[in-house]
Amino acid sequence: MENLFDLSLINSTIRMMAPLLLAGLGGAICARVGIFNVGLDGLMLIAAFIGVAANVFTNNIWISILLAIIGTMLFSLLFGYMIIHLKANMIVTGIALNFLAIGVTTFALRTIFGVQGAYYNNEMVGLPTWRIPIIDDIPVVGNLLSGQSPVVYLGIIATIGMYIFLKKSVLGSHYDAVGINQVAAKSQGVKIKTIQYQAIIISGILCALGGVQLSLGQVTMFSENMTGGRGFIALVATMLGQSNPIGVFLAGGLFGFTEAISIRLQGLNIPTNFTLMLPYVITILAMFVFKDRTQLSAMKNSQGSSR
C-alpha cells in the first residue's frame, strides 16, 4: 500500500491532468463569452486522430501537432458557425459534434489504415520529455515537475497566461462583458461575434493539444473513441472551476489524480472495471458536492438560441 502513494504518483497526476486541463481551459474561455461548449470531447478525439495520422505520414512530431491544431480549429469553427451564425442550440450542436467526431475518426481509421479498434505503428514519434534545467537539480521537486512532455508544460503556461489575460487585459474584460450581457457589451462597441469566434478558436487549439497529449504523449497510438469521455470530465472541471483558469487547474488536478490512482489500483488485484469507473464516479460526486458553486445557473442564462 505504501507504494500506492509515493512521489511518482504526483508526477503521474500532472501527466494525466494535462488533457483535462487543456480541454477544461478551452471550455472556460468559451464559457467566458457565453458559449457552453459541449463538444470538447469530439475536438480532442479529432486532434488525437489527426496527430497520429500526420505522425505516420510525416514522421515529425511538431508537424503532427501543427496539423492537429489546424484540423481541430476547422472542426471548432464548424461548431462556431452553427451556433453563432445559424443560431443553432449550442447543447445539441455540441453533442452532435461529439458523435460526428466518433464517426469521422472511426471511418478514417478503417479507410486510411485498414484496421478496426486501434492503430499502432512502432515507427511513430511520440512527444518528447523535457528535463528542465535548474528545477531538474532540485531534490524531490525535480522528480515531480521535470521529465514531462512539452504539452504538459504548455498546459501550465496556458493556465497562467489565460488568468492574466482575463484579469488584467482590456480584451479579457471584453470577453467577460460578452459573457455577462451581450446587449450592454454591444452598446460599448464590442464586436460580439468576433470575440466569440476568437474564444472558439482558442478552445480548438487547447483541445487539440489535449488530444495530441492523449494519442502521442501518454501512448503512441489511436483507438476508437480513445478520449473515453475525458472531454465531458473537462467540462465538469470547467464548471467546478467556475471558468476561472486557476479553478480549472485545481479541478483538473483532482480528476488527474483520480485517473492516476485508478491505474495504480489495477496493480493491486482490484477488478479493472472498478478502477476504470473511479474517475467518473468522482466526477459525479464532485458535481453533487460543488453543485451550488458551479456555473450551471450562469449557463442557463447564456445567450444560446432555443432553436
Image (tube, rainbow, N blue to C red):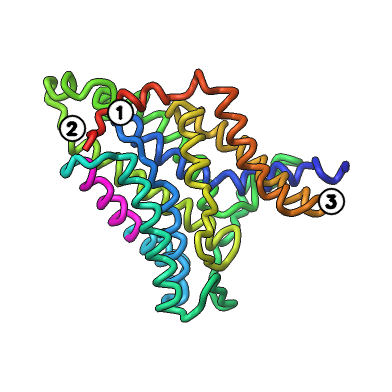
Q: Reply yes or no: does residue 245 show up in magenta.
A: no
Identify the residue position indicated by label 2 in the image.
192
Question: CA separation, marks 3 and 1?
Answer: 47 Å
Amino acid type, label 3: Leu
The residue located at (76%, 49%) in the rendering is 264
Marks 1 & 2, CB-CB < 8 Å contact = no
SS class of the residue under badge 2?
helix
**Residue nearer the viewer, 151 or 247:** 247
Q: Residue 19's spot in the image, x, y percent?
A: 52, 48
Q: Is residue 69 above or below residue 259?
A: below
- Chain part drawn in magenta: 71-83
Note whether residue 103 is visible: yes
All told, the count of numbered labels is: 3
Q: Is residue 71 left or right of residue 125?
A: left
- Name of the residue lying farthest toward the right: 1
| Of pointers 2 and 3, the one earlier in the residue sequence | 2
| Of pointers 3 and 1, the one earlier in the residue sequence | 1
The residue located at (55%, 23%) in the rendering is 290
Q: Residue 273's spot in the image, x, y percent?
A: 71, 52
The residue located at (51%, 28%) in the rendering is 240
Q: How would you rate the neighbour count of disc 3 (Cα within 10 Å): few for under 14, some for 14-19, many for 20 or more? A: few
| Image quarter of the C terminus | top left
Q: Is residue 189 left or right of residue 21?
A: left
Q: Residue 221's spot in the image, x, y percent?
A: 55, 68
Q: Main secondary structure of the magenta part?
A: helix
Identify the residue position indicated by label 3 in the image.
268
Mark in front: 2 vs 3: 3
SS class of the residue under badge 3?
helix
